[in-house]
Each structure stands twice: as structure tokens, then as C-alpha cells.
Amino acid sequence: MNETVQQVLYDAARLALAAPSIFNTQPWLWAVGPDRLELRADRTRQLRVVDPDARLLTISCGVALHHATTALAGNAVDTVLLPDPADRDLLAVLHLSGEAASGRTLAQLRRAITTRRTDRRPFSQAPVPAHTLDRLVAACAQQGAHLYQVPYQHLATLALAAVAAGALHLSNPDYRVELADWTHRPLWSGDGVPVETAVEASARRVPVRDFAPFGGDTLPAGSDNDFGALYAIVYTDTDSTGSWLSAGMSLSAILLTATAAGLGTAPISDVTEAGAIREQLRQILPSGYPQVAVRLGHPQTGEPPATPRRPPEEVISLVRA
Ligand SMILES: Cc1cc2nc3c(=O)[nH]c(=O)nc-3n(C[C@H](O)[C@H](O)[C@H](O)COP(=O)(O)O)c2cc1C
């Protein structure tokens, strides 16, 4: 057994626990072997109401996968997606195949893993620079999905989709139970979305998902209004499990690249959760299937509170040779 390789793989899985996930469910399991790292879906953590097809679960696992490969910067990594058709929970296997150039950009992305947070507060009026958008588009494409910047004339479609999604969700008693469950977790669980990371309601270009409809201490909205925010949609050519993984890897690349550039980030998936609303969003895309939207911009001072993570021993297992 090569202890060193196993330790490197363990450290990557450990760092990847910081990945964002739908409702902070952290629906993944890592198995670290002497020379391979396996990523499995933990379907016990699937959101039955929000995510009946496990699409957002798979996207979340794709985010974690890209976090792990970023954590392995300096190594050449072979990644095989969905290696076993008979084992649909095995989402990816990673092997190290030597050394690779790391470079400043990768080091910055690696650092961004620990500094990134979902920021639901409005962003400022200052626009996202065009050269940063170019880098985000390229980072997304490198992981297999496409990034579509929602142009001004289609912002109303996105805003209406978000309003419709919120109304549809909150009028569904089963959604309210699921949301209450994941926003009121016991401390020991190390998961879920604390109400303190939600933001008080205010006039926004596109409303954000309400994580505090049952009350609680939320963040003040401040005086910013999202007027400089960039809204973009991660979309894929097909709508398969493999595409969902790519969408997650792309989302991770976007979030880490934006964080490294000093931007605030917030994924938005409610607009893709109901079939009819997702279809409205699909109409504004050049082609393909919307997987998840994202809001990026210049954040207010001070960071939103951190969200918890599950203890590594619950999520990462060591496999002996
Ligand atoms: C696939 C996916 C979908 C998400 N959807 C939303 C959303 O619709 N609204 C939102 O405010 N946050 C959304 N998030 C952000 C998660 O709630 C957040 O990652 C999680 O609570 C952990 O917090 P952190 O990102 O600050 O680490 C999403 C994240 C992922 C990966």
C-alpha cells in the first residue's frame, strides 16, 4: 500500500467536504483506496420534494468532484465518470497518474475552496468585469457545460421564474416540511441551511429562495440592489446523469473562479425544480437544458455566516489494499 498516495487522496476528499450542495445536504460519500478515490451518491440524503429525480443531488456531487480535483492541484489526475453501469451510485473514480504543473491560478482556486460561501445578500451596482466573465465562461466549458449570461431583455423571464418557483414551492405543504427540516437541523448533524444565512426580504432584480418563511434572525439586506449582479445559467446539451455531473463540475469551476476574483456567488436552482418553470427558462437558452443558475457580483463588506459540514469520519472511508 502506498501510504503517501492514500494520504494525498484523503486530504483531497477532506477539502472537498467544503463543497456547496443543494440545501447543504452533502449527498456524497468518499472511499479512499491505496491508489484510487471513489465518489458515491448518498441517496439517503436526496430531497424527495425538491429533487425527485436526484438531478440536484448529482449536480452537488459533481461540485464536490471538481473541488477534489482542484484540491489535487500539482498532480495529474485521471477521472472516470460513471465507471460501472451496474452501480449507478458510483459516480466517479479518480487515480493519480504523476505530477502536473500547478501554477498560480490553480493555487488560487484551491484557496477559494475554503473562502467561498453562498452569499444571498444583494450585490452592488458595480458590474462584473468583461474579462472575468470570459474566464468564467472558459472555466465552465472546460468542465463540459455551457454558461449563458442572461441578457437584460431576458432578466424578467428569470425573475418571473423565481417568483413562480417561490409561490409554487411555498404553497406545497410537503415542500414546507422539507424546507423546515433542512433549515432547522440539530447542531450535531453538521448539515442544512441555517436561517442566519438567509436574507431579509427586499426589492431585488431576481428574488432569492426564501430560507426563512417560518421566521428567525436573517441577515439585513443592506442598501445594495443587485443592479450590477451577473445572472447566468449553466446548461448542458443533454439531460443525463453524466450531464448533471458535468454541470456540477462546471458550477464548481465558476464558483471557485469567481471567488478567487473577489466576487460574491450564489447558486439558484429553484427556477429549475418544477418542470414547467424549467421549460420557461429553457426557452431563453440558445440550446440545451438549464441545470442551475448563478448570481455573481461585488459583495457587501463582511462575510455571511459559514454553514456547517458533516464530520469527515461519517463521509470518508479508508479502504485497505
Ligand atoms: C446544486 C445546488 C443548488 C443550490 N440551490 C440554491 C438555491 O436555489 N438558492 C440558494 O439560496 N442557495 C442554493 N444553493 C446553495 C446552498 O444552499 C449552499 O451551498 C449550502 O447551503 C452550503 O452553504 P455554502 O455554499 O455557504 O457553503 C445551491 C447549491 C447547489 C450546489
Image (spheres, helix red, strand yellow):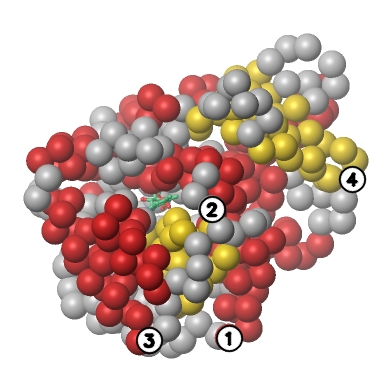
Give the image location of residue 161, x and y in percent. Answer: 26, 67
First in sequence: mark 2 vs mark 1 = 1
Gap in angstroms between the C-alphas marked 2 and 3: 26 Å
Give the mark toward the camera: 3 or 4: 3
- Viewer-side residue, 306 vs 102: 102
Q: Residue at x 38, y 24 (%)?
A: 44
Gap in angstroms between the C-alphas marked 1 and 3: 15 Å
Q: What numbered label is drawn on residue 99?
A: 4
Q: Look at the numbered disc 3 and give the secondary structure of its residue.
A: helix
Give the mark toward the camera: 2 or 3: 2
Q: Look at the numbered disc 1 and give the secondary structure of its residue.
A: helix
Q: Which residue is mark 3?
A: 152
Q: Give the amino acid type for the residue marked by disc 3 in the picture.
A: Tyr
Q: Which residue is mark 1?
A: 130
Classify 10 Å Cα crowding around label 2: few (below 14), some (14-19), many (20 and above). Answer: some
Q: Give the amino acid type for the residue marked by disc 4 in the picture.
A: Glu
